[in-house]
Amino acid sequence: MTLGFRNRIDVTLSVADRRITGVDIQPRTRPPLGRLFAGKPAEMLLAALPRLFSLCAGAHQVALLSALEAARGEQAKPSTRHRRIEAVLTERFAELMRGLLIASMADNRSAAQPVQRLLQAIAALQTHSGVSQQSRAATLSQIKTGMVALGIGLPGEPVLPGTPLASMMDAARKAADDGGWRHMPAEHGILSAADDGAIVAQLIDVGSAFAEAPELDGRVPETGVWARYAERHQLASAGPVERLSAKIAEIAELFRWIETGEAEDQAADPHAVASYALGSRRGAAAVECARGRLHHAIDLDAHGAVSRFAYLAPTEWNFHPRGPVVRSLTGVALRGTVDRQAIHTMVGSFDPCVGYHLAFRGMADA
């Protein structure tokens, strides 16, 4: 995002006796979109979203479109809904792949050119509208070849040996064995579509104040790749290995769905897009994007202009001062200089939608 607002999250770790004893998070500042667009046509806000959000712009547009339709008492045609779900899932695949590719390059600069070619193919996939089936098939084939070279095979397969992802898994496994990463409390749970009603009510009643530091009855649940995986498989806790495995599994499954062109949205994600009519000229929507569940809520005035608007991005849950990142890092044992990269990897696994800065307090030997 732009507009001159603080676009970074600061994470400061307090360390004593070679163990993380506290995690302080200074969140980003969010532009007051409700105030900036109040009294303006809703279409003006819709057109501004790609410029305001460099990541998951498609998910934001689908969320606002769906919320607007609910506020206007309209309902999207099944074909329109399917196109939106397809766009959301393709963007989710692209965002997860980009993150994985950038991480794979950290210790392997020789892979820069193949990675760049794969990123270009992924970008082409997102803009495939109007291209021939032959051109799309060639793009998918290029992506599939690149995924195999990275280490991703079919859904459900283990990471292919001797690949960059296999090396990443080994590093994550070592961090889990040596650092005590598994001690993450599970009582706060995960965010799911079942929470939409409570979240939408807070966005409507409280607005941006709720969105800046959200919680549900004192809980700050996790959202994102691991949350989706954990909900499906009824899991309670995760370290670096489990988080990386969940991301790889979702990428493989999303690509299978994209490649086969399934007509049944339920086969991909039954909760990918949801909308809620909340009375006269009031609506909300939720979209399951790469980083987790995104919510939009909007009120329209009698002329159809924006009266109130609030949004809640996944990053506000995961990087909450009492949220999943804090719980995942608190209590972790440290061994020396290698921990700095391991901690970066763990924080990065939550994939914030803005940059972050990691600092250490009282950690002279790390």
Image: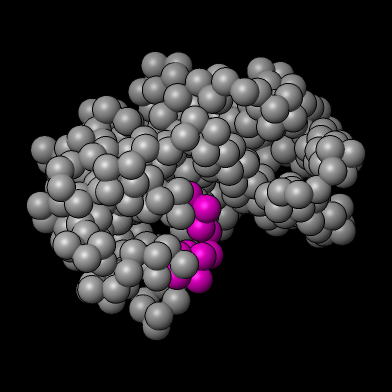
- Image position of 43 (left or right of 343): left
Q: Which of 20 and 86 is in front in this view?
A: 86
Q: Residue furthest front?
A: 303
The percent position of residue 292, horizontal first and vertical second, equals: 42, 42
The percent position of residue 89, horizontal first and vertical second, equals: 57, 38
Question: Is 222 situated above or below 322?
Answer: above
Residue 221 sits in quarter: top left
Q: Quadrant of the N terminus?
A: bottom left
Q: Which residue lies furthest to the bottom in this view?
A: 4
- Image position of 269 (left or right of 236): right
User: Is residue 210 visible in this depiction of the protein?
Assistant: no
- Image position of 193 (left or right of 269): left
Residue 294 sits inside the magenta stretch = no
- Image position of 139 (left or right of 43): right
Residue 308 sits in quarter: bottom left
Q: Residue at x 72, y 38 (%)?
A: 165
Over which residues does the magenta segment extend? 48-59
Q: Residue at x 62, y 41 (%)?
A: 90
